Image (cartoon, helix red, strand yellow):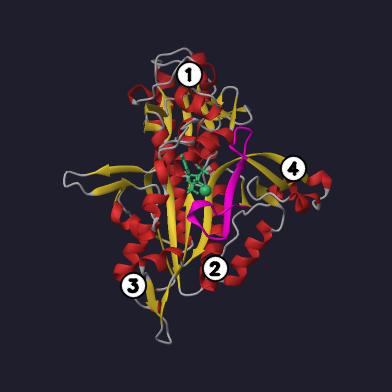
Amino acid sequence: MRLSRYFLPVLKETPSEAQIVSHRLMLRAGMIKQNAAGIYSWLPLGFKVLKKIEQIVHEEQAKAGHIPMLMPTLQPADLWRESGRYDAYGPEMLRVTDRHERGLLYGPTNEEMITDIFRSHVSSYKALPLTLYHIQWKFRDEVRPRFGVMRGREFCMKDGYNFDLTQEDAFHAYNRHMVSYLRTYERMGLKAIPMRADSGPIGGDNTHEFLVLAETGESEVFYDAAITDLTFGDRSVDFDDRAACQAIVDEWTAPYARTDETHDAEMFDKVPEERRRTSRGIEVGQIFYFGTKYSEAMGATVVTPEGDRVPVHMGSHGIGVSRLVGAIIEASHDDKGIVWPEGVTPFHCGIVNLRQGDGDCDAACERVEAALIAMGLDPLYDDRDERAGAKFAGMDLIGLPWRITVGPRGLKDGKVELTCRRTGDSEEMGIDAAIDRIGQIYSVAS
Ligand code: ATP
Ligand code: MG
């Protein structure tokens, strides 16, 4: 993409309405525009990151054997009357009446709808186990929408629902979700810690939240520092292997890690003092096992091998897709701007031309751009007629992890400069060497 043709409305001033750094940087970097309280447009740069996050979620769900689909944002009120949540949900639910006076609502979550779909089509244990999920916008009329996309009213969530014959099967589905989430967050450059959580209005007694440690997080968290040393890495997992999934869950749930809602001071005191940590965290996901709560209320039953008809065991599992964009920035920025982890960066590499209009510089930049595109990468070429300082500041603000700088001086010796956004380190090298290096970083061949 050529910056001169792109839509990147960066702000020079720091927006005064933004209280936290991710919100400020998203506005300044031209990623989002607020349309109403807690309701945002995703401008091209923000939209790209959102799609990257969705893509990682899809890939990791596929590995776990979970099946993507799409349910609507608007749901009939009658479905929610069946579960009893139409009245219970309260003012957070946006209720709408259509021209025929029928009650609708903008979905805050989808347990009722997915249970309705399930009961319409499944009646035998043979269809189980089954996990369906979608990535869809939700609406919750939060009392205090704030912190930009971190606590919006309209926000994007991945929500998945498992259907199983027995509690034991459903626990395996729970474990599959925990394992797949661990890798999902890690691919986004995040350390998200599973913490035992409170079941809240959805109900049930087996639930974990995933929290990213950050000063600006809304939850107070207590944990054993040992958990921050765990990494998932690229270990291969057989998601049908119950013992293997359980072992990973055990590994991540052994160290103490809880939010203020479930914190147990006595247990915490047993953690060696030097490893006891109190901090704040951003909730980026949650998994729940809630048994037959919805299947019983809504008649989602299957016939067992013995011929009995029983309600299915269910759970729901969410990832805060749009909140993650803010959470990643909270976890990865400096005083110059965003520092995108490679896994979610909107463009793989920036190209800065220090003398736009100079035949050699232009040709070299175009060569770098074409080579990166040919490798399947997505570079952003700053081809504007601007001062070098302004171009560097812009690139630092939008946070691309790598930058190739082309200037007349280096080019005389056939050299360009490769700069790492995170460390600020620069290295002079030949054009092809720089292209190869970017290819290696993203594991694509030149
Ligand atoms: P919170 O406690 O932050 O209000 P929640 O527990 O009500 O969230 P869940 O029902 O668990 O939310 O939804 C799954 C995920 O969706 C959350 O872990 C969070 O990452 C995200 N999420 C929830 N509410 C919002 C919101 N208002 N804006 C953005 N993301 C949200
Ligand atoms: Mg939650």
Disc 1 Cβ-to-ligand 1 distance below 8 Å? no
Q: Earlier in the sequence, mark 2 or mark 3?
A: 3
| Residue under the point 26% across and 48% down | 103
Give the residue at the far top of this rendering.
387
Q: Amino acid at mark 2?
A: His
Mark drawn on residue 277:
4
Q: Nearer the viewer, mark 3 or mark 1?
A: 3
Neighbourhood count class around disc 3 (C-alpha, 10 Å): few under 14, some 14–19, many 20 upward = some
Q: State the separation of the CA atoms marked 4 and 3.
A: 47 Å
Callout 1 secondary element: loop
Q: Position of residue 56 (x, y in %)?
A: 47, 49
Callout 3 secondary element: loop
Queried whether the magenta region covers residue 304, the answer comes back as: no
Callout 4 secondary element: strand
Q: What residue sits right under mark 3 in the picture?
A: 122
Mark drawn on residue 172:
2
Q: Earlier in the sequence, mark 2 or mark 4?
A: 2
Stretch of the chain drawn in magenta: 196-219
Q: State the separation of the CA atoms marked 2 and 4.
A: 30 Å
Asked if the residues shown at circle 2 and circle 1 are in contact, with their CB atoms under 8 angstroms apart, the answer is: no
Neighbourhood count class around disc 1 (C-alpha, 10 Å): few under 14, some 14–19, many 20 upward = few
Q: Earlier in the sequence, mark 2 or mark 1?
A: 1
Q: State the separation of the CA atoms marked 2 and 1.
A: 46 Å
Q: State the separation of the CA atoms marked 3 and 1.
A: 52 Å
Q: Amino acid at mark 3?
A: Val
